[in-house]
Image (cartoon, rainbow, N blue to C red):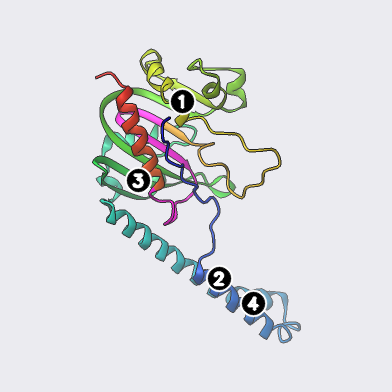
């Protein structure tokens, strides 16, 4: 029985931090204090005062983001990963990440990046923002360099049209129902991934189960390209989960290397 590490449950929504909550308390207090005096004001003045009273919330949220970033950087540095500028990242990694689907993780999407050696593996962890407005998505990605030269292989969640119009399958029901695979060398990659099915299959939620966050791993996307294996999933990291993705991919790479011909 393979011991598969727990997938990290990233946060899809911005959870208010202590400073933002304190700012909210100040805002409510100000609203109560000025509740009677603002009744006779014009609508324009009223909106101006209301926006001004919301300043503590915005300031608190700003400092919460700063504190979160510092905490994440410190955790990563403690485990051998240093903050990197985008231009410092490996060019082959950037090329591979850009080819991912359904979200292309281009250089312009990178919000922050850290690189280094984690448990004897060269690793890059990046935060991404893709899309705009209501289509904006946050993603976390983790990449590990391997000594193997992989044929470009993309694995992503299978959508409805893919179930009707199949592309490439592994011939394993649990995988083919959930994942779409596109590979430059399907004959080479099939026997290798067939031994790793448990790493891709995500159990369905029980009926009537309610979750604020989508199940971790359901919408994940992978790419094998050259020497890099990249795993990405929706959401934003937090100090409790930042290393879970690193643990998961490290264990995956160590297992798949045992299944790969020299």
Q: Residues within 10 Å of mark 1 (few under 14, many from 20)?
A: some
Left of 231 or right of it: where is 45?
right
Q: CA distance from mark 3 to mark 1?
A: 24 Å
Question: Of helix, strand and loop, which one carries label 3?
Answer: strand
Q: Which residues are drawn in magenta?
A: 223-243
Q: Residues within 10 Å of mark 4 (few under 14, many from 20)?
A: few
Count of numbered circles on the image:
4
- Residue linked to disc 3: 125
Position in image of residue 155 (x %, y %): 45, 27
Quadrant including the C terminus: top left
The secondary element bearing badge 4 is classed as helix
Spot occupied by residue 81 in the image (x, y as percentages of width and height): 28, 50
Mark 4 = which residue?
Answer: 28
Instruction: Indicate left or right for 228 with 104 as reference.
Output: left
Mark pair 3, 2: CA separation: 29 Å
> Residue at coordinates 37% horizontally, 38% vertically from top-left?
249
Q: Nearer the viewer, mark 2 or mark 1?
A: 1
Label 3 or label 4, whichever comes before in sequence order: 4
Marked residue nearer the N-terminal end (3 or 2):
2
> What mark, if any, has residue 197 been given in the picture?
1
Between 139 and 200, the one nearer to me in the picture: 200
Among the two numbered marks 2 and 4 on one chain, the one whose residue lies closer to the N terminus: 2
- Residue that numbered label 2 is attached to: 21
């Amino acid at each position: 029985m393979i011991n598969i590490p727990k997938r990290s449950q990233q946060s899809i929504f911005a959870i208010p931090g202590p400073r933002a909550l304190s700012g909210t308390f100040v805002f409510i207090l100000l609203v109560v204090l000025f509740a009677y005096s603002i009744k006779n004001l014009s609508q324009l003045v009223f909106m101006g005062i209301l926006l001004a009273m919301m300043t503590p919330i915005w300031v608190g949220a700003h400092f919460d983001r700063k504190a979160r970033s510092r905490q994440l950087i410190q955790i990563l540095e403690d485990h051998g990963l240093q903050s990197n500028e985008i231009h410092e990242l490996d060019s082959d990694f950037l090329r591979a990440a850009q080819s991912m689907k359904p979200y292309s993780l281009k250089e312009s999407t990178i919000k922050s990046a850290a690189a280094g050696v984690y448990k004897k593996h060269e690793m890059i962890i990046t935060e991404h923002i893709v899309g705009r407005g209501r289509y904006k998505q946050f993603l976390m990605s983790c990449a590990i360099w391997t000594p193997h030269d992989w044929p470009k292989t993309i694995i992503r969640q299978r959508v409805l049209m893919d179930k009707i119009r199949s592309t490439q399958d592994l011939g394993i029901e649990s995988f083919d129902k959930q994942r779409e695979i596109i590979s430059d060398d399907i004959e080479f990659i099939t026997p290798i991934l067939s031994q790793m099915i448990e790493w891709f299959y995500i159990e369905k939620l029980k009926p009537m189960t309610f979750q604020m966050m989508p199940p971790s791993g359901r919408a994940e996307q992978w790419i094998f390209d050259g020497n890099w294996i990249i795993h990405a999933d929706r959401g934003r990291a937090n100090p409790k989960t930042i290393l879970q993705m690193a643990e998961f991919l490290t264990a995956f790479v160590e297992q798949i290397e045992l299944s790969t011909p020299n």
